[in-house]
Amino acid sequence: MKKRIPYVIFLVSLLSLTVLCGCDKSTKSAQEKQEKTENQEQVTKEETDRKKNNTINLYYLNAQEDGFKKVSCKLQHSDDPKEMANEVLYKLSDTENNNTDKYKASIFDGVVINDVNVSRGKATIDFGAGYIQLSHTQEVLLRTSVVKSLLQIQGIDGVLFSVNGSSLLDNDKMPVGLMEASTILTDDGQADIYSAKKKVKMYYTNETGDKLIPYLTELTVTDNVPLETQVLLALKNPPASKKNLKSPLPSDFYVNQTQILNNICYVDLSSEVEKAAVNVKEKVTVYAMVNSLADLDTAYQVQFTIDGKKISKLNEFENFDALLTSDFSLCK
């Protein structure tokens, strides 16, 4: 019996150590859980206090217009979510007083708000026709800014958008639907907000440079480069797998700027466009650009300038300064 006492003592000690370790882990886990709960309660309390004080963060555009600048604002209206929503939208579009060197209005010039309605926790914002003139990047910035700002109002849990009474459609012609907190990309609304897939029809030329060949592909719209600019730049690089497609543009072709206004795509090109692509007729070069842009459905006509100036003749192509529409007679 005496020989077994140390062994029994060892077992008792080991069991005690195990129990102590288990208790320590349980205590640590309980503390961590309590701290997490306290942090969540603190955030919830701060959010509740902020709503009670009618103080929210307005999400303006930053100075570079590639993200957001949060600006604290105490709303004048306190009881009516619709009036509060109207106040927020007015401030987000108030370019006169909020166009500073630090932030800018997120509801762009030319975008009119026809109506605002709040019912059962949903705010419906109806825009005028000017909304459809926005680039994809501008659309995403505007919607993100509006949604993140309005969701802070007590009584608004989601936002719907429409244009002249019709549901807002995405690039695939499907309704955008209700935007809630879960649909906002990041806390600052910046990560990947420009990223989107868009099916486009590009018009390359054949090997002899006298015909256009339509080619359906998909572009990833990224950063703050307008889709129209990306389409023109993509014309420089036909897919390597398609040996029958040739670029209709000179290799050093560059786009200074593209802008959509009143269903017209204004395109300012660099002077390199005057260097004809090898064995490509100027008419083919011009309508490769026009057809590709018009197929986006953001504009029906194209107005070209070169380094900011209207040029009546592009080499052998007459009326280069006119409003141009699609010409499918050149398609193979």
Image (cartoon, rainbow, N blue to C red):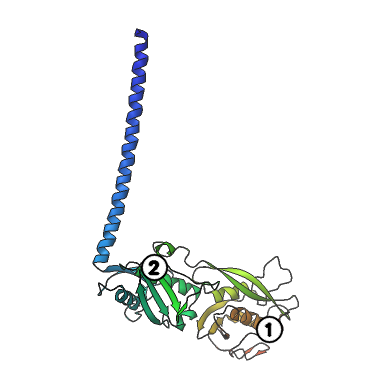
Q: Residue at x 36, y 28 (%)?
A: 18
Please indicate whether residue 223 sits to the left or right of residue 2 in the image.
Answer: right
Q: Position of residue 274 (x, y in %)?
A: 63, 83
Q: Position of residue 119 (x, y in %)?
A: 35, 72
Q: Nearer the viewer, residue 99 or 112?
A: 112
Q: SS at mark 1?
A: helix
Quadrant for the C terminus, please: bottom right
Quadrant for the N terminus, please: top left
Q: Residues within 10 Å of mark 2 (few under 14, many from 20)?
A: many
Q: Quadrant of residue 127?
A: bottom left
Q: Is residue 129 above or below residue 103?
A: below
Q: Is residue 269 above or below residue 38?
A: below
Q: Residues within 10 Å of mark 1 (few under 14, many from 20)?
A: some
As shown in the figure, which amino acid type bears the numbered disc 1? Phe
Q: Which mark is residue 158?
A: 2
The total number of labels drawn is 2
Q: Nearer the viewer, residue 310 or 61?
A: 61
Residue furthest front in the image: 120
Please indicate whether residue 115 sits to the left or right of residue 212 in the image.
Answer: left
Q: Which mark is residue 328?
A: 1
Q: Position of residue 154 (x, y in %)?
A: 30, 67
Question: Is residue 34 in view from this perspective?
Answer: yes
Q: Nearer the viewer, residue 299 or 30?
A: 30
Q: Nearer the viewer, mark 2 or mark 1?
A: 2
As shown in the figure, which amino acid type bears the numbered disc 2? Gly
Q: Residue at x 71, y 85 (%)?
A: 329
Please indicate whether residue 204 sits to the left or right of residue 130 in the image.
Answer: right
Q: Which mark is residue 152?
A: none
